[in-house]
Image: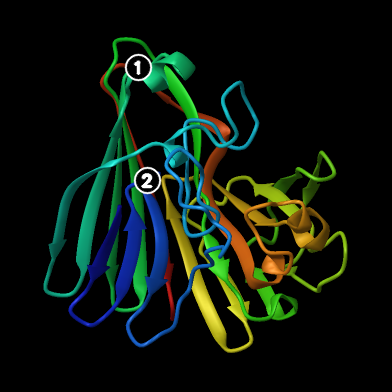
Amino acid sequence: MSIELTAPDGARVVMSLDGGHVLSWKPAGAPEQLYLSPRSEFVPGKAIRGGVPVCFPQFAESGPLPKHGFARTLPWQLVSQQQGKDDALAVMQLRDSEETRRLWPHAFELELSVRVGGRSLDIELACENLGDTPLQFTAALHTYLRVADLDAVSVEGLSGLRYFDSIKQAEALQRMDLLLTGEKGVLDLDRIYFGVKERPLLVAEDRRQVVVRHQGFEDAVIWNPGPERCARLADMPPEGWSEMLCVEAACIGRPIQLQAGESWVGRQSLALP
């Protein structure tokens, strides 16, 4: 089931209750900002390729659970939807079930709040430990930004940060802004940048810019499959890699730990300057 949020100024978001997934974001007076694969099947229980998937309670394959956890493949509940004076807001919720407890033996409540208005989009993920034992998790908002010319894209704000290169399985230091030149080995990107915290990132493409800000998320993931890996993805067209760049708010380096009754909140804010 899809939900459409429209702010008074025309800014618009489309979400799916399957996976608690943001599918589309069109700021006021601007075109689509997110990439959604035309080959996504939209089948219950199957992850959607593109938009903003929720990775929880495990990022990627760094643990015993299915890749990126189970939140992105389960049905969520719509808690509220409203239009305010300057924006529109929807809140979705996912709670533990017999299915999740078979994979991950914890009682929890996830809440995803999506607010759109003007030229900005705020996505907030909150987790509460409803059980009587501690739990820990890793998480990410796996945001696929749409681009027109990947060769013209740069990501500013990463300079000086340590990162883990998942392709080379090695750590390195980012010494300057990240420039996507279209060269093999640069495009085949899968990097976890540690300690980004609230440092703003600027994704620039010619005259277009998107400012990405995080709160509560300590890390950031930059991902593009490149042409060879993209060709092996059944739910993406062969040229899809050239139309997107993932810039993800994440908590990976230091998993979130919650005692019984404790909560955590993380936010990713996207804005056109």
Horizontal arrangement in the rendering, residue 111 relative to residue 82 (left or right): right
From the top left corner, tell me how far across and down residue 85 is, in percent: 11, 74
- Asked whether disc 2 touches disc 1, contact meaning CB atoms under 8 Å apart, the reply is no
Query: Disc number at residue 98?
Result: 1
Is there any visible trace of residue 217 in the rendered image? yes
Q: Which residue is at 48% across, 18% downward?
A: 103
From the top left corner, tell me how far across and down residue 37 is, in percent: 57, 63
From the top left corner, tell me how far across and down residue 233 is, in percent: 70, 52
Compared to residue 139, the image places residue 16 above or below, namely below
Horizontal arrangement in the rendering, residue 125 relative to residue 79 (left or right): right
* Neighbourhood count class around disc 2 (C-alpha, 10 Å): few under 14, some 14–19, many 20 upward: many
Horizontal arrangement in the rendering, residue 208 relative to residue 132 (left or right): right
Query: Disc number at residue 119?
Result: none
Compared to residue 181, the image places residue 51 above or below, namely above
* Residue projecting furthest to the right: 184
Q: Quadrant of residue 11?
A: bottom left
Q: Nearer the viewer, residue 159 or 135?
A: 135
Q: Nearer the viewer, residue 55 or 214?
A: 55
Q: Which residue is at 35% across, 10% downward?
A: 133
From the top left corner, tell me how far across and down residue 64 is, in percent: 61, 21
Q: Which residue is at 33% across, 67% downward?
A: 13
Q: Amino acid at mark 1?
A: Glu
Q: Nearer the viewer, residue 176 or 52?
A: 52
Q: CA distance from mark 2 to mark 1?
A: 18 Å
Q: Which residue is at 12% across, 68% downward?
A: 84
Q: Earlier in the sequence, mark 2 or mark 1?
A: 2
Q: Amino acid at mark 2?
A: Asp
Label 1: state its secondary structure: helix
Q: On the image, numbered disc 2 is attached to which residue? A: 18
